[in-house]
Amino acid sequence: MKKKILFISIIFAGVAFCPQVYADKSSLEGFGMEDAVINVANTSGKAVVSISTEHIARIRDYGVYNNSFAGSPFSEDEFFRRFFSDFFGEVPEREFKQIGLGSGVIINPDGYILTNEHVVASADKIVVTLADGRAFKGEVKGTDSRLDLAVIKINARNLPFGLLGDSDALKVGQWAVAIGNPYAFAMENPEPTVSVGVISALHRSLGSALAQGRDYGNLIQTDAAINPGNSGGPLVSLRGEIVGINTAIFSTTGGYQGIGFAIPINNAKRIISQLIAGKRIAHGWLGMVVQGLNEQLVQYFGLADARGVLVIQVLQGSPAEACGLKAGDIIRQIDNIVISNAREFLNAIDRLEAGHRVKIIVIRNSQQSGLEAIVGIRPDEAEAAKPQQPKSAAGGSWRGMMVAQANEGVFVVRVVPGSPADAAGVSSGDLLLEINKQPVANLIDYKNAVTGLKGNCLVRTNRGYFLLRD
């Protein structure tokens, strides 16, 4: 039976809110659920904007020579481009206009608008349409692709604007309102649309494969309908406070299926002033890879509980290396923040400013100690991992792992179903780094490490630590 493939769609849409209406909790006194939603729609909706973008893409038109060649896999190949240039002259380019739609929320009466970075990325032209039908040229003031946030500016004053709430105070089950306005430029009635639901979950992650370099690791999940075109607009509480910026839907069909995601508004509050000023956002970085602790690892390291994170790898030249952190260290605390899991650790680091001196409490060889590191600036892009091709197999298997030598070390090429390696979570493609704290750089190291090895053993891979039982 074939597995159904699930897709996550990043969708454009608009939601915005004018918070002045609910300046305090007493504003909701006497309001029923229906009245509260109506009030949010009638007031906060005035701050919702539609954002339409244009991008001119230039593509070589090989069709002037042979229509069957245009659009083929070779049409953008550098070798074939030179071949055509040598024999036929430089290939002409055609321009194609790409249109994008999204939403945003006015956060300042002077025309500053918060939206997603992916809504305005690569835009050559931005048009912002207000809920009252007026249209303005938009200018990008600042962007942060990691958090997927951007601020654009229109030349207008005395605009209705939204109040930024506190996403850290959100609770699962709390009512939420999503307001979108992606088609205001084309509708006779430019007022936004409203959907209502609850906060379904907090601290959700889309995973690195779907995030595509963005920090989608602390999202708000809601069942308030977030339809195509709603990216960039906020998610709002019944008090009219913006608690998130709608970003994505989870879908097997491309349409709404009750699972939407929003960026917590507190992520935006930390950087809005820098975005308005056009400054580069410097995210905190220590330069290490960590994992959470499970029951097996807690027992292996002799810990009292599963609090903290286990360091898998320390990057060369990083602040983590400079302060003396090592693979196998268990981090329990960052400054005054007690670390319970990997998510809390990553959030704590990302909130630190570059240059900040931070104290790290670690457990190493069952002893607790303190280290000090100076937080660095996260690099713009992580170096892309190069695909590894096995050169020679080791032959046989050990605890269900079959391995091979590749350019950068020993890779697992197959895991026997039901074996100790399979039960521990080791997967084909994993890079072996250590076996029982013995470095594994090649097949000789691997054979030396496993020969005669009995009892439970700790294997470190590029994905983390795994306890293989005898």
Image: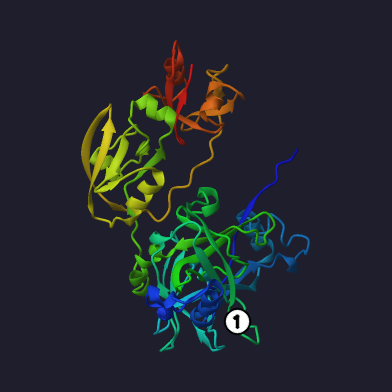
Does residue 297 lie above or below 41 as drawn? above
Q: Position of residue 341 (x, y in %)?
A: 39, 43
Does residue 427 lie above or below 69 as drawn? above
Residue at the top extreme, as displayed? 452
Q: Is residue 13 visible?
A: yes
The residue depicted at 33 percent of the width and 29 percent of the height is 303
The image quadrant of residue 314 is top left
The image quadrant of residue 394 is top right
Residue with the mark numbered 1: 184
Image coloring type: rainbow
The residue depicted at 51 percent of the width and 79 percent of the height is 39
| Image side of residue 316 versus residue 73, left or right | left
| Image side of residue 263 versus residue 391, left or right | left
The residue depicted at 36 percent of the width and 43 percent of the height is 340
Q: Position of residue 232 (x, y in %)?
A: 51, 69
Q: Secondary structure at mark 1?
A: loop
Query: Which one is in front, 24 or 145?
Result: 24
Q: Position of residue 135 (x, y in %)?
A: 54, 87
Query: Which one is in front, 156 or 106?
Result: 106
Q: Amino acid at mark 1?
A: Ala
